[in-house]
Image (spheres, coloured by chain):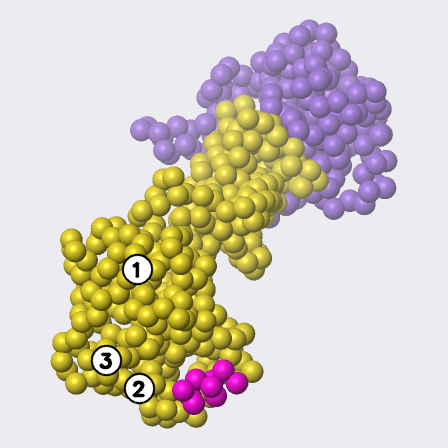
Chain colours: A yellow, B purple
Amino acid sequence: MLLLIAWRNIWRNKMRSLLVIISVALGLWAGTFIMAYAFGIIDQRLEDAIENEVSHLQMHHPEFKKDKDPRYYIPQGESLLQRTLNDERTQAASARVLASGMVASAISSTGGQFLGISPEAEQSVTGLQDKIIEGSYLDEEERNRIVIGQKLANKLKVKIRSKIVLTFQDTSGHLVAGAFRIAGIYKTPNTTYDETHLFVKSQDLRALLGLQDEFHEVAIMLKDPDKLEEFQGALQQQYQDIQIESWKELAPELRYMIESLDQYIIIFLVIILLALSFGIVNTMLMAVLERVREIGMLMAIGMNKTKLFGMVSLETIFLVMIATPVGLVLAYTTNQLLGQYGLDLSGLYQEGYAALGFNPIIYPHLDNIYYVRIMIMVAVAALLASVYPAITAIRLNPVTAIRKI
Amino acid sequence: MNQQKEVIITKNLTKVYAHHVVPVKAVSEVNLSIKKGEFTALVGPSGSGKTTLLNLIGGLDYPSEGKVYINGTDISAIKKNRLIDFRLNNIGFVFQAFNLIPVLTAKENIEFVMLLQKKSRRERDQRVIELLKEVGLEDRMNSRPSELSGGQQQRVAVARALASKPKFVLADEPTANLDSKSTENLLDMMARLNKYEHMTFIFSTHDQRVIDRARRVVRLVDGQIESDITTEQSTQWV
């Protein structure tokens, strides 16, 4: 009977109950969607960073990363690359020769990171060829060709077949310069990366650096990213004089972002639930204070405090029980649809997103466990929100309440 | 003449409302005893203490001084929470208005107190039908209070008050919102219940029609009993 009374009570003022249900449902929908959006954007950034920039693992000479001195190359690089490629856990690997220096066109100049690559191997790791938006990829036959990012091309005011000059220090510490003709212009979601990374064939860069067949870096993509730590450990064991780092060390900002996202999400959700709870408390308090005489009568005829508390709490719980599935189904549907088709914000914030390395097309997604967590948090919030109105009801003095009759 | 046991006894019952600027003595040293089967009206001008006395007898309020005995139990010594259960099992209430739970039907309203008493479904169903017949509302059992007239609502309230099989029924101005015909019907019904179920009724009222039907009239003035007139043997069934 308590369930029946509580259920019917919430429909006494349909408009008010519907408003509460709608506000809770919309709050949950918005909160859940924003969570999925945040996960979508972070996961996408991570995916882009791994695919385009840092790969799963990188190998360097232990001294190389300090000041990127080209003298610190990986000895016996070729055999190391072959052994890595032969490991069944490796999906692809690309050996790179690296140099940092100035890049100059006829009009402008800027700093840059020069990557000497094997075009085929690099394609298997970063898919660089697929990101070419103008011109062509590096050709095995042609010498001194270069692929640069769109942002840099705009900055240097160069186009396909323009000549640019790279100046950097060789392994002996002398400044060397080489002229390269632009073969292609690429574009990734990260404009900062595009502005600073230039790709040439490894033999062209080696010739300028004074290297034979050595590498500075081996970038590795794994078949199963879940085995990252295991493979990293195994490689480190095998090559103790080489520094092997995963994307977590190479891009610590991404790791921190992912690690802190869970906490941010919970704080965010708590804020939403707090706001919703205050709305619920307000409504239920109104509902209780409107029924003072009725509650007085119920106490007079023998409804004890426990049952009265239960009745008012049930009313709150019912409201939330209706709103929660509505909000979560809405959110789930939205997240599934946008997760499939993407939320294209390129018209609004493309430049801002790209400058931060984020793709302007967001694919929100949320693991099912989060829907369960949200349901539990909402249930707790509903229970807490029901306490104050219920206490107000049981604190009523039947005589005072009935006097109003 | 029937010698009946006293259901209610008050001894030097006093209630002072101390939260006013000047403490107000709403009920002052009232000594009253009511026997089973009485049909008693508490009358008096506004502020004379009728409702306060009913509240004290009904265990809705605690006396400042004195005692209230219901069937020999001193209810002024019972703690608040236990007093609710005591009321549930011993006292029936009929109020002036807002008497019923608006979201329940007539049948459910009557059944409600029995559910609080944890009576079995069979017992509940049987008693509800019996009471609805008694108050002449079998055909309206599935109507909600808003679909019933004021008189019908009060009849349901009386049925609900009786559902728990109380020792007595307290009715605070039960006819105040009713027209003459509804008042007559309600009084007829209560008189019938008094006669056939030997139910004890105590009313507070201003209504001369109720006073005319009462067999004992206790008049209160300034919280004290001014007169206590028994029109005929008060426990003799009408």
- Contact between labelled residues 3 and 1, with CB atoms less than 8 Å apart: no
Q: State the residue position of label 2.
A: A212
Q: Are marks 3 and 2 in contact (CB under 8 Å)?
A: no
Q: Residue at x 47, y 86 (%)?
A: A82
Q: Residues within 10 Å of mark 1 (few under 14, many from 20)?
A: many
Q: CA distance from mark 2 to mark 1?
A: 25 Å
Magenta segment main secondary structure? helix
Quarter that holds the C terminus of chain B: top right
**Residue at image mark 1:** A182
Extreme-top residue of the structure: B180
| Residues drawn in magenta | A78-86
Residue A43 falls inside the magenta stretch: no
| Chain letter for mark 1 | A
Q: Residue at image x 71%, y 17%?
A: B148
Q: Are marks 2 and 1 on the same chain?
A: yes
Residue under pointer 3: A209
Q: Secondary structure at mark 3?
A: helix
**As displayed, is residue A392 above or below residue A203?**
above
Residue A101 drawn above or below residue A21: below
